[in-house]
Image (cartoon, rainbow, N blue to C red):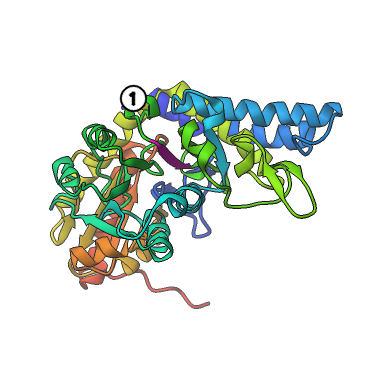
Amino acid sequence: MFTSTERQRIRDDFPILSRTLSNGMPLTYLDNAASTQKPRPVLNTVRNFLETSYSNIHRGVYSLSVEATDAYDEARKTIARFVNAKHATEIVFTRNATEAVNLVAYGFARKYLHPGDEIVLTELEHHANLIPWQQTCLATGAKIVPVAFEDDGSIDPAKVIEKFSPRTKLLAISGCSNVFGSLTNLAPILKEAKAQRITTLVDAAQLAPHYPVDVQALECDFLVVSGHKMVAPSGIGFLYGRREWLALMDPMLTGGDMIKEVWIDRATWAEIPNKFEAGTPNIEGAVALGEAAKYLQALGMPRIHEHCEALANDAADKLALIDGVMVLGSRNRSGVVSFLCNDVHPHDLASLLDQEGVAIREGHHCAQPLMRKLGVAATARASFYLYNTPEEVDVLVEAVEKSIRFFTGKLSLPVAKVV
């Protein structure tokens, strides 16, 4: 875990964390699995780029356009280093992980899958790594082969591998659950998939912000990430794809800047990755994403994971001691803690916690099949990140205890004074 001095220095980088809410309560932000806050280096990079270097890219020969193009291309190189891609051209900027999954579903799966082919995925996938494959199956005649998760929210690699068959053409699997926070032991799964010539996609939306990712060591074919979950702005993410596959894939969007030659009745595509980035991209977002990757790497991804895991396990242990609270998942988690309160609906709990300044998420977390398997409609979810503190764990626990006392009639809130 970061030291108290390091924690304060990190928190000083995030101006939003010092604000108070409209009710006068200080902000305790624990919804980081949904989206993270942004540090000053990223904020400053966006502002400086827009104030001094903004121009369209890949089109102009004037100095400002060349400068903006260099910044955009340098960001791609930074992201390639962040996931240890062999080539910068294996990084395609997208709006988010969802768009990246859809790009693979459209450009790869619809092109190479046939009736009867199988797509293996787990029952804990969030909708972004499920719906695109459902649509792929409708379009190609392929079918989804689901893998059940364990009682503690983990995935047994052996049970994934058991599902592989000669018809398995694609494995789409998350590296970290957005509900349980459980980390998937990807290495043996991906190794066996490669041995059986199964194409693999890793959903790293929750993994990459917390954990070192090395696509060459994993030997995955595709990997997707959202920038806003790793201290970059929303509207930017990326797809990593092995160069051989990207070269064979079709673009999902067509139009300007993704072409090589155009005639009135036909066109040819630019080289990778440009053929997948039609139109003017989110230039400042890509530049900011590169800065976000630098920021995280400077802190050290192993230390970020250690910090978040320690906070989440501390929260899980303390919440589990509260009468009527059930914590989901195992201790092998990222920064996510999902829990249920016997007498309080997650929505009511989150609303009352908000009165204490504590921001958590409630709902199905875009994982309805998982919720259905658990037999619940929703859970409460607190998710920690690099700027959260042990003191905020205690704020959460005290607020949950107070909320339960209120909803069970053991605590009365102050009556508003009418003037």
| In the image, farthest residue toward the bottom | 418
Q: Quadrant of residue 48?
A: top right
Query: What is the magenta segment's predominant secondary structure?
Result: strand
Q: From the viewer's perspective, tell me whether residue 184 is left or right of residue 64.
A: left
| Residue 340 falls within the magenta-colored stretch | no
Spot the residue most to the right. Answer: 62
Secondary structure at badge 1 equals: helix
Q: Is 164 placed above or below 240 here?
A: below
Does residue 224 belong to the magenta stretch? yes
Residue at horizontal 31 percent and vertical 50 percent from the top: 396
Left or right: residue 185 versus residue 368 is left
The residues colored magenta run 221-225
Nearest the viewer among 100 and 346 is 100
Front residue (pair 75, 399): 75
Seen in the image, is 215 located left or right of residue 266? left
Three-letter residue code for mark 1: Ala
Residue on which the image places disc 1: 217
- Could you tell me how many numbered marks the image carries? 1
Measured as percent of width and height from the top left, residue 370 is found at 25, 60
Which quarter of the rendering shows the N terminus? top left
Q: Residues within 10 Å of mark 1 (few under 14, many from 20)?
A: few
Q: Position of residue 182 (x, y in %)?
A: 24, 44
Residue 9 visible from this viewpoint: no
Residue in the picture at 58% in, 48% down:
251
Q: Residue at x 66, y 32 (%)?
A: 72
Q: How far across and down, in percent of the image, does residue 418 sit? A: 49, 78
Question: Residue 26: x percent and y percent?
Answer: 46, 49
